[in-house]
Image (spheres, rainbow, N blue to C red):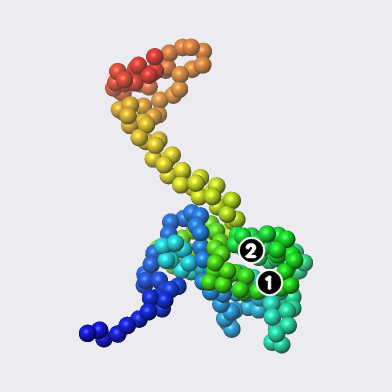
């Protein structure tokens, strides 16, 4: 006999306690919520994003326009023209990351929350993510930038290739069975003379290395 029953849909958008942030890199993310806290500055929103592994965090997005107490759209006061253009460009980056074209953005009667929320549009965005350093006070996970899908596909492949390339370097050197001092030997001169001696205290290199040098 069951003592309780919870529908599976009640678990959607909620992650397990203690879900660890992913490694640094580029990820596809959902925008799960846009929060407007009374303690935040006028024109600021918290964009809550969710990663493929379930990790959730929020990123501050600063709007060039906001809604006043009368429900009217007004430009955020106190901003210079450069700041307005910068905030607008940042917002365009997020919208294009979600797959909107520049023409769709500029032709819209109004851009609002529903344009961004994944549960409203089924759209997902792409971010460059940097995790916070565990155990370091004041270190937080951050969304460094939003990129479009084409950029994401290129960047994620390049990022994935870097660890593989780094791992290949010591593996290649190790196959030669060179002694540790071999890495510090000077290169052979370009004039065709033999390589200079590294000193009598060093053991002669193994035959495999001699074959390579010759």
Q: x%, y% of residue 142?
A: 51, 63
Q: Nearer the viewer, residue 38 or 182?
A: 38
Q: In the rendered structure, are the residues bearing label 1 and label 2 in contact, judged by CB atoms less than 8 Å apart?
A: yes
Task: Please state if 87 lies on the left or on the right of 161 as rendered.
Answer: right
Residue 90 found in image quarter: bottom right
Please, which residue is most extreme toward the right here?
81
Please, which residue is most extreme toward the left here?
1
**Residue picked out by circle 1:** 111
User: In percent of the image, x 65 and y 74: which residue is there?
Assistant: 112
Please, which residue is most extreme toward the bottom here?
70
User: In percent of the image, x 43 and y 73: which residue is there?
Assistant: 12
User: In percent of the image, x 73 and y 83: which residue is there?
Assistant: 72
Task: Please state if 135 lies on the left or on the right of 29 as rendered.
Answer: left
Residue 73 found in image quarter: bottom right
The label number, if any, that marks residue 95 in the structure image: 2
Residue 119 in view, yes or no: yes
Task: Please state if 27 lies on the left or on the right of 203 as rendered.
Answer: right
């Amino acid at each position: 006999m069951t003592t309780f029953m919870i529908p599976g849909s009640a678990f959607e958008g909620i992650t397990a306690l203690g879900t660890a942030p992913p490694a640094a890199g580029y990820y596809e993310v959902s925008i799960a919520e846009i929060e407007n806290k009374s303690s935040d500055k006028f024109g600021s929103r918290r964009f809550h994003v969710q990663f493929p592994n379930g990790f959730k965090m929020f990123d501050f997005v600063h709007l060039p326009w906001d809604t006043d107490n009368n429900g009217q759209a007004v430009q955020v006061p106190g901003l210079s023209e450069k700041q307005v253009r910068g905030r607008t460009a940042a917002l365009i980056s997020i919208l294009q990351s979600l797959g909107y074209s520049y023409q769709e953005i500029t032709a819209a009667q109004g851009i609002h929350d529903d344009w961004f929320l994944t549960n409203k549009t089924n759209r997902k965005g792409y971010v460059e993510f940097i995790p916070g350093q565990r155990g370091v006070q004041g270190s937080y996970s951050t969304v460094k930038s939003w990129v479009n899908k084409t950029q994401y596909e290129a960047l994620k492949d390049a990022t994935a290739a870097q660890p593989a390339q780094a791992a290949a370097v010591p593996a290649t050197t190790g196959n030669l069975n060179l002694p540790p001092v071999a890495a510090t030997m000077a290169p052979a001169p370009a004039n065709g003379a033999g390589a200079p001696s590294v000193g009598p205290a060093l053991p002669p290199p193994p035959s495999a290395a001699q074959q390579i040098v010759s």
